[in-house]
Image (spheres, rainbow, N blue to C red):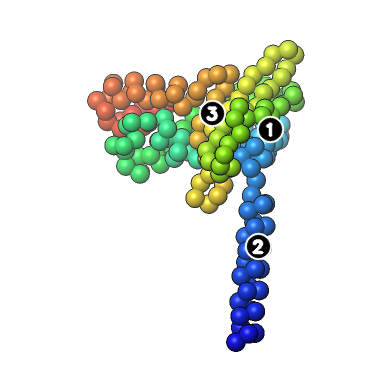
């Protein structure tokens, strides 16, 4: 009996230690953003020669990298805003795929000019009480006296991974900008979500 009790306690302690180790190895939001940005910029550097000669190859590579850290379904929900309540899961996924192309073109076109300028991660305006709560990671690109601030709006998915669901560039909220476009298309197509998804460019 005593041996069984000791074995149970040992296994419980071992499990707790493994769990604590796993939690400590989970990257913070800033670390996740740093990793994704670093990988994306490396991919841009590799693909830059194809931007003029083979754009399909260039954007396909960027799309593959962007897809690793962007949750396009969540992006779709944010862009649709109130209209998402009337959308089916299939429509959200379909619109997410449309936004995959939109964001890939945006990222790819914006970053092709990036040539190793200084990229600085800015401290949060307020320290989050819950390290797992949705948060914004702020970055600043410094180049020849010009400064552009970027913000990644991140959340943790069910698998505990940090994913991007919105992006701010130079103070411009891309989700809000895309929502304005989506709402205008909804008015034009009599609130037909399928028609809007088909018309999205």
Q: Please give the residue where the numbered disc 1 appears in the rendered image.
A: 41
Element at badge 1?
helix
Residue at 68 percent across and 22 percent down: it is 141
> Disc 2 or 3, which lies upstream in sequence?
2
The residue at the point 67 percent across, 36 percent down is: 34
Q: Which mark is residue 18?
A: 2
Q: How much space separates mark 3 and mark 1, taking CA atoms?
A: 16 Å
Q: Which of 98 and 19 is in front in this view?
A: 19
Percent position of residue 16, x then y: 63, 64
Q: In this view, does 170 lie to the left or right of 120?
A: left
Between 58 and 138, the one lying in front of the other is 138
Q: Using the numbered discs, state the Cα–Cα distance from disc 2 to disc 3 in whole angstroms.
A: 35 Å
Where disc 3 sits, the SS reads strand
> Decide: marks 1, 2 in contact (CB < 8 A)?
no
Q: In which quarter of the image is residue 145?
A: top right
Q: Quadrant of the N terminus?
A: bottom right
Q: Report if residue 192 is visible in the image.
A: yes
Residue pictured at 69% horizontal, 13% vertical: 146
Label 1 CA crowd tier, 10 Å (few <14, some 14–19, many 20+): some
Q: Are marks 3 and 1 in contact (CB under 8 Å)?
A: no
**What residue is shown with label 3?**
167
């Amino acid at each position: 009996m005593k041996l069984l009790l000791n074995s149970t306690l040992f296994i419980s302690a071992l499990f707790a230690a493994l769990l604590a180790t796993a939690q400590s190895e989970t990257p913070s939001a800033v670390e996740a953003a740093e990793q994704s940005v670093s990988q994306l910029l490396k991919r841009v550097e590799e693909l830059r020669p194809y931007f003029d000669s083979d754009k399909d190859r260039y954007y396909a590579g960027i799309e593959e990298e962007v897809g690793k850290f962007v949750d396009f379904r969540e992006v779709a929900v944010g862009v649709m805003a109130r209209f998402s309540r009337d959308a089916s899961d299939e429509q959200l996924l379909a619109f997410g795929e449309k936004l995959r192309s939109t964001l890939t073109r945006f990222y790819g076109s914006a970053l092709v000019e990036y040539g190793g300028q200084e990229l600085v991660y800015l401290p949060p305006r307020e320290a989050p009480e819950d390290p797992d709560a949705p948060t914004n990671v702020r970055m600043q690109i410094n180049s020849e006296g010009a400064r552009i601030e970027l913000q990644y709006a991140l959340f943790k998915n069910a698998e505990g991974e940090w994913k991007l669901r919105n992006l701010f560039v130079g103070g411009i909220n891309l989700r809000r900008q895309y929502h304005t476009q989506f709402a205008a298309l909804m008015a034009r197509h009599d609130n037909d979500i399928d028609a809007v998804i088909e018309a999205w460019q």
